[in-house]
Image: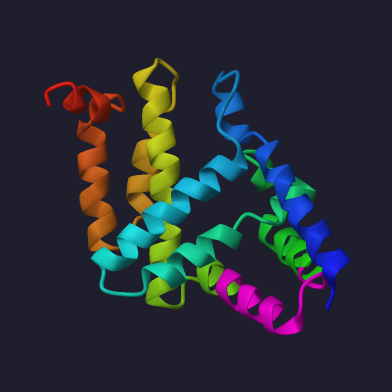
Amino acid sequence: MKGKEIINYFFELGVLKKIYHNGPQVAGVKEPDTVAEHVYRAAVIGYVLAEMEGVSGEKVATMLLFHDNPETRIGDHNKVAQRYINRKKAEKKVLKDQLKSLPSQIAKKIDKYWNEKENHKTKEGIIASDADLLETALQAKEYVDIGYPTKNWLSNVKKHLKTKSAKKLMAQLEKTRFTQWWKDLKKI
């Protein structure tokens, strides 16, 4: 067993709690969400979307739990920065190095899930990508509702959604203020 390597891998994942999303910083958000916060909500969204679409919520949520792990070593890059680097190639290299820390049967499964999400070749991979995008849209909507200039992010996400369920949820997201969930609770 690779006990020390596995523990080090877990500690490395803690870096995601310290990496702020770069795009919102460019939009003036002083303390944007972290990559770890994004991963958590994307996994929950992925689970729900997958179940709505009739496939395994567990598989899609698992894909999303690992999708941004390479950012521990290369950070988060906004769309402007991505014009100058091959993010996909860099992330694949990081993932390969990270997975050396894990038992081979686990590493193979994570690698398969990561590629499935990145390549959008399966229904689960497409749903995972939609969940990733929807989480970004939710965060952008929160920023819009408090006055940051991120409204165009919503239309950008909308153009890239593939599943019927994600498109339906996106339409509702656009009409809902991010504080509505607790205002509805006050009526009870």
- Residue 64 location (% of width, % of height): 52, 60
Image vertical order of residue 169 relative to residue 179, above or below:
below
In depth, the one of 57 and 115 nearer the eye is 57
Which quadrant holds the C terminus? top left
Question: Can residue 92 be found in the magenta stretch?
Answer: no
Identify the residue at image location x=24%, y=64%.
52
| Bounds of the magenta segment | 99-114
Q: Is residue 151 visible?
A: no
Image vertical order of residue 39 relative to residue 179, above or below:
below
- Residue 132 location (% of width, % of height): 46, 53
Question: Can residue 112 be found in the magenta stretch?
Answer: yes
Q: Main secondary structure of the magenta part?
A: helix
Which quadrant holds the N terminus? bottom right
Image vertical order of residue 28 relative to residue 94, above or below:
above
In depth, the one of 66 and 26 nearer the eye is 66
Please indicate whether residue 11 sits to the left or right of residue 188 in the image. right
Image vertical order of residue 148 relative to residue 178, above or below:
above
Q: Is residue 133 visible?
A: yes
Please indicate whether residue 175 sits to the left or right of residue 155 in the image. left
Identify the residue at image location x=80%, y=60%.
7
Task: Choose top left, top right, bottom left or bottom right for residue 94.
Answer: bottom right
